[in-house]
Image (tube, rainbow, N blue to C red):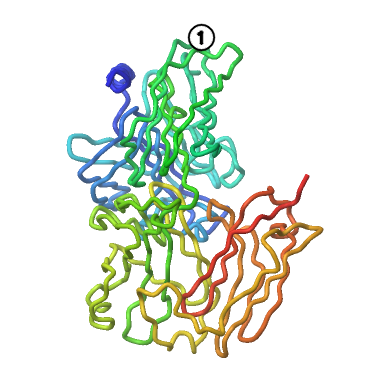
C-alpha cells in the first residue's frame, strides 16, 4: 500500500497526461506506403491507463477503439495492416485499413476519450523519418522532433522503442535495464539490473515485483517491494529468490521519476507459454467458414492449470477484446469470420465460437499466424501454399491432430550444430504439402528448412539461420505445417557453440 501511494504522488507531481500520441510515421520509404504508416500511442504515467473507449481522428478519418487499457510506459501501435510481414517486421496492435497520412503536408491527430482529449499537429513528413513526441519544458509532451535515422535502422525511429530525443536530460532517472529469470531448485532467481541515467544524483526509489498469473496484463500478486539504493557505480544488481510454482509474467516497476519511460519491465517465467494455436483452416470449401482454434494449454505447462483471461490476447493481428472472456485449462476457442456460418456447418461443438471484429481473411498462398497474450508472442505457425486438394478436404475443429496417420516426421536427435547437423525426415500423404521452419522463443522465424509435396523428404539443419548466419546457442522450435491447417512442433537445441 505504501508503494502504490508513493507512485501516485510522484505521478501527480510530474503532471503527465493520461495518454499521448508518442510517435507517427507518414512516409516510410523502406516498405510500401500503404502498409508502413503507423501511429503510436503511449502512456507516460506511472499507473495503468483505463479508458471506456477511445476515438483517434486524422484529417477527418476516425477509428473507434473498445475499452482500452495501456500499462505504465506501454505503447500501442496502429497501422494499416496488423501483420508484421506487411509492415517490415513491425507488429501492430490494431489494423486501420482507412489510415492514410499525407506525404506532402503535416497532419492533425486528435485523441478523445471520456474525461479527456488531446490534439497534435504533426510536421510535414520526411521520407523514412518518424516524428517523436518529445518532452519540452514549455510544451510538455507535445513537441515533435525527427527520429535520429531512417526507420528499420534499429535506432529511435523503430516503433515501440523509448524516446531518445528529449530536449532536457532527466534530472533524476533510475531505469530498469534488464530483468532475468534463472530456475534454481524448486523455484528460481529473479535478477533486476537498475541504472542511473540522470544528470543529478538520484534519491532512493521503490522497486515492486508483481506476478500476473493469468496473463491478462494486470499484475495482481505482490512478490516483493523494496527500496533501491542510488547506484554508486552507475548500476546496481538486485536478486530475489522465488519459491516453487511461480508461473506467469513478472512485472518489475520502479517508483516514478523524471523519465518514467524505462521504469517498467515485463518477464515471462513460464516453462512453456500457456496458449497455443491448436488448428487452423485457411482454405475451406466454397460456402464454408475459415477458422483458427486456440487452446489453453496451461494444464500441460508445469502441471499448473489455471483460467486465462483473453481480453489482452490477439491472433492474426486481431485483438480479441473484452468479449473473449476467459478460457479454462484445456479449453478451446474457435475464431472465425462468421459465427453463424460456423455453427450451421459444424453444429454443436464443445469449444466456444468467437467472431473477432475486423476479421482479416487468411491467405491461401502462405502466411504466418501470430498469437499474443499480454503483449508477448506465445505461439506462431507458418504454412505454405494450400493445395486445391487440401482446400476441398473437410476439416473438423476441436481435434488436435486430424492429419492422416501417414503424415509425420522423424528427427535424428534434439541438437543441431554446424559440425553435427540434425536430419529431419518428413512424410507427406498423397495430394498433401508441407513447410518446415525454425522459430526462436519470441516467435520469429530464423530459417525456412524446406517445403514440398507428397512423399518422403529428408532435410538437414546445421543450427544456423537464414544465409548461414550464426544463431545464439539455446532452445528453438521446429514447426512442421501440413496443408489443410495441421501443425506439429518440437523443441530442439541449436546454434553455434563459441
Give how far across and how far down residue 397 sits, in percent.
36, 76
For disc 1, the neighbor class at 10 Å (few under 14, some 14 to 19, many from 20) is some
Asked which quadrant contains residue 467, the reply is: bottom right
What residue appears at the point 54 percent right and 72 percent down from the top-left corner?
A: 481
Asked which quadrant contains residue 82, the reply is: bottom left
What residue appears at the point 38 percent right and 47 percent down from the top-left corner?
A: 374
On the question of residue 34 being in view, the answer is no
Q: Nearer the viewer, residue 379 or 315?
A: 379
Residue extending farthest front: 186
Residue extending farthest left: 115
Give how far across and how far down residue 253 sits, in percent.
41, 28
Give how far across and how far down residue 264 sits, in percent.
43, 31
Residue extending farthest right: 419
Q: In this view, does 41 lie above or below 28?
A: above
| Left or right of 455 in this view: 59 | left
Asked which quadrant contains residue 336, the reply is: bottom left
Q: Nearer the viewer, residue 200 or 151?
A: 200
What residue appears at the point 81 percent right and 58 percent down from the top-left corner?
A: 419
What residue appears at the point 57 percent right and 63 percent down from the top-left corner?
A: 490
Quadrant assignment for the N terminus: top left
Kind of element beneath mark 1: loop
Give how far across and how far down residue 452 sits, in percent.
63, 80
Q: Name the residue under label 1.
A: 201
Quadrant assignment for the C terminus: top right
Q: Which of 160 and 456 is in front in this view?
A: 456
Q: How many labels does the image show?
A: 1
On the question of residue 124 being in view, the answer is yes
| Left or right of 470 in this view: 372 | left
Amino acid at each position: 500500500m505504501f508503494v502504490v501511494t508513493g507512485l501516485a504522488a510522484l505521478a501527480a507531481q510530474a503532471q503527465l497526461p493520461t495518454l499521448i500520441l508518442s510517435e507517427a510515421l507518414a512516409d516510410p520509404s523502406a516498405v510500401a506506403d500503404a502498409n508502413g504508416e503507423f501511429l503510436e500511442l503511449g502512456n507516460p504515467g506511472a499507473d495503468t491507463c483505463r479508458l471506456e473507449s477511445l476515438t483517434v481522428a486524422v484529417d477527418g478519418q476516425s477509428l473507434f477503439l473498445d475499452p482500452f487499457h495501456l500499462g505504465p510506459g506501454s505503447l500501442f501501435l496502429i497501422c494499416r495492416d496488423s501483420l508484421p510481414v506487411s509492415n517490415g517486421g513491425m507488429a501492430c496492435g490494431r489494423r486501420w485499413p482507412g489510415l492514410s497520412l499525407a506525404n506532402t503536408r503535416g497532419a492533425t491527430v486528435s485523441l478523445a476519450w471520456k474525461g479527456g482529449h488531446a490534439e497534435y499537429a504533426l510536421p510535414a513528413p520526411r521520407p523514412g523519418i518518424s516524428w517523436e513526441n518529445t518532452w519540452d519544458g514549455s510544451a510538455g509532451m507535445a513537441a515533435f522532433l525527427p527520429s535520429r535515422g531512417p526507420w528499420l535502422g534499429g535506432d529511435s525511429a523503430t516503433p515501440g522503442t523509448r524516446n531518445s530525443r528529449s530536449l532536457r536530460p532527466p534530472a533524476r532517472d533510475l531505469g530498469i535495464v534488464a530483468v532475468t529469470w534463472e530456475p534454481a531448485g524448486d523455484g528460481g532467481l529473479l535478477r533486476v539490473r537498475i541504472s542511473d541515467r540522470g544528470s543529478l544524483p538520484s534519491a532512493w526509489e521503490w522497486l515492486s515485483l508483481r506476478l500476473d498469473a493469468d496473463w491478462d496484463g494486470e499484475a495482481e500478486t505482490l512478490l516483493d517491494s523494496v527500496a533501491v539504493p542510488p547506484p554508486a557505480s552507475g548500476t546496481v544488481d538486485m536478486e530475489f529468490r522465488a519459491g516453487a510454482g511461480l508461473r506467469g509474467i513478472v512485472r518489475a516497476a520502479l517508483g516514478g521519476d523524471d523519465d518514467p519511460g524505462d521504469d517498467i519491465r515485463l518477464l515471462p517465467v513460464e516453462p512453456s507459454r500457456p496458449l497455443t494455436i491448436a488448428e487452423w483452416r485457411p482454405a475451406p470449401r466454397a460456402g464454408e467458414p475459415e477458422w483458427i482454434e486456440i487452446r489453453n494449454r496451461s494444464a500441460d505447462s508445469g502441471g499448473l492449470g489455471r483460467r486465462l483471461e483473453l481480453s489482452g490476447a490477439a491472433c492474426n493481428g486481431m485483438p480479441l477484446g473484452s468479449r473473449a472472456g476467459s478460457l479454462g485449462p484445456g479449453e478451446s476457442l474457435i475464431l472465425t469470420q462468421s459465427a453463424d456460418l460456423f455453427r450451421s456447418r459444424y453444429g454443436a461443438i464443445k469449444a466456444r465460437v468467437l467472431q473477432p471484429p475486423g476479421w482479416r481473411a487468411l491467405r491461401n498462398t502462405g502466411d504466418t499466424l501470430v498469437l499474443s497474450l499480454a503483449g508477448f508472442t506465445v505461439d506462431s505457425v507458418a504454412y505454405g501454399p494450400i493445395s486445391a486438394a487440401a482446400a476441398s478436404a473437410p476439416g473438423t475443429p476441436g481435434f488436435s491432430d486430424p492429419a492422416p496417420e501417414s503424415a509425420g516426421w522423424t528427427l535424428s536427435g534434439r541438437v543441431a550444430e554446424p559440425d553435427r547437423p540434425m536430419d529431419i525426415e518428413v512424410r507427406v500423404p498423397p495430394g498433401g504439402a508441407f513447410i518446415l521452419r525454425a522459430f526462436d522463443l519470441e516467435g520469429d522465424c530464423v530459417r525456412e528448412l524446406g517445403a514440398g509435396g507428397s512423399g518422403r523428404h529428408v532435410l538437414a539443419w546445421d543450427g544456423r539461420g537464414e544465409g548461414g548466419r550464426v544463431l545464439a546457442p539455446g532452445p528453438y522450435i521446429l514447426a512442421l505445417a501440413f496443408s489443410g491447417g495441421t501443425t506439429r512442433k518440437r523443441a530442439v537445441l541449436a546454434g553455434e557453440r563459441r
